[in-house]
Image (cartoon, rainbow, N blue to C red):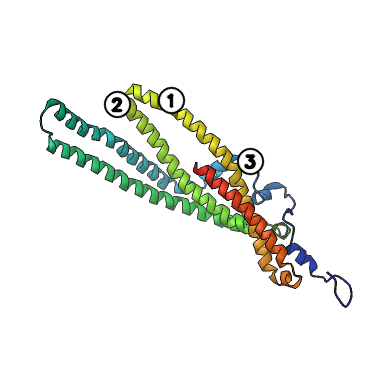
Amino acid sequence: MTDNATGRRPRYEPDDEAVVRPPDARPAATPGPLRAIGMPAEKSKDFGGSTKRLLARMRVERARTIAVLYLALVSVTLTVLGPRVLGHGTDLIFDAVRGGRGVDFPALRSVLLTVLGLYLCAAALSYLQSYMLAGVVQRTVYRLRSDVEDKLSRLPLSFVDGQPRGDLLSRVTNDIDNISQSLQQTLSQLLTSVLSLIGVLTMMFVISPLLATVAAITIPTSFTIIWLVTSRSKKRFVAQWRHTGTLNAQIEEAFTGHALVKVFGRQHDVEQRFGNKNEELYTASFGAQFISGI
């Protein structure tokens, strides 16, 4: 665009070009540790090391973490014992019917009350475990956010200027929230599921080794199916967060340079870019949630 009086391009037009940057534009790759804030890779380069560093941040919560493990262990133990005790009630009814005599209702009532007490205690301990785990996770994420803020304050202006601000905001907000939700859900489910699997298998072998062996054969099949599903959903989750960062960058730039967008009549271009990227985000998010939900 040229100035009507001088025929020259106005000095501030490069800012307008930055606002309507084409969708395929990407900041230059940043070497070294600064790449940790850049676009996510297609595949995790050091998942084990990242997990260890993340768990190391929870060392200050060691006492509460041990308490969470103990509560989960007791809760799962009580839950597993429930069906075993309830089986005595079934035996009372079956023996009474087979022997042609009346059911011993006082003994049956005692069994049912015992089972009810076990389940109530297990539910209370599970609630307390979830409550304590939520505190551990949120305090860890709180410290992580503080560390990220300190890191951003130490970065040179050249790095910040070379990154879309919306993408940086997405890293500080969306990505850390994603870590928080993953820790909250994964730790609780993983801990409970593993303990439940061990407890249930142990009780099954105690009751009937043959039936337990038949049931145990299906476990590798289940793990294979889970691996196939998660491997497909992982790529879509990576795409989801990549599109989220890009879309946030576009929105932030469009609102920051709203006056320039209006002056140079680029509303349609900005809206079209937003619509295209929003559609890509919708497709990636829908696929990720659908496949992981399977």
Helix, strand or loop status at disc 1? helix
Check contact, mark 3 vs mark 1: CB within 8 A: no
Of 184 and 268, which appears nearest the observer? Answer: 268
Q: Which residue is pictured at 62% across the width and 47% down the height?
A: 239
The image quarter containing residue 67 is: top left
Helix, strand or loop status at disc 3? loop
- Specify which label sits upstream in the sequence, 3 or 1: 3
The image quarter containing residue 170 is: bottom right
Which residue in the protein does label 3 denote?
43
> Would residue 167 be visible to someone looking at this image?
no
Which residue in the protein does label 1 denote?
217
Figure check: 103 above or below 238: above
Check contact, mark 3 vs mark 2: CB within 8 A: no
> Residue 265: horizontal and vertical position, in percent?
75, 70
How far apart, in angstroms, are the residues tagged by discs 3 and 1?
Answer: 32 Å
Of 291 and 35, which appears nearest the observer? Answer: 291
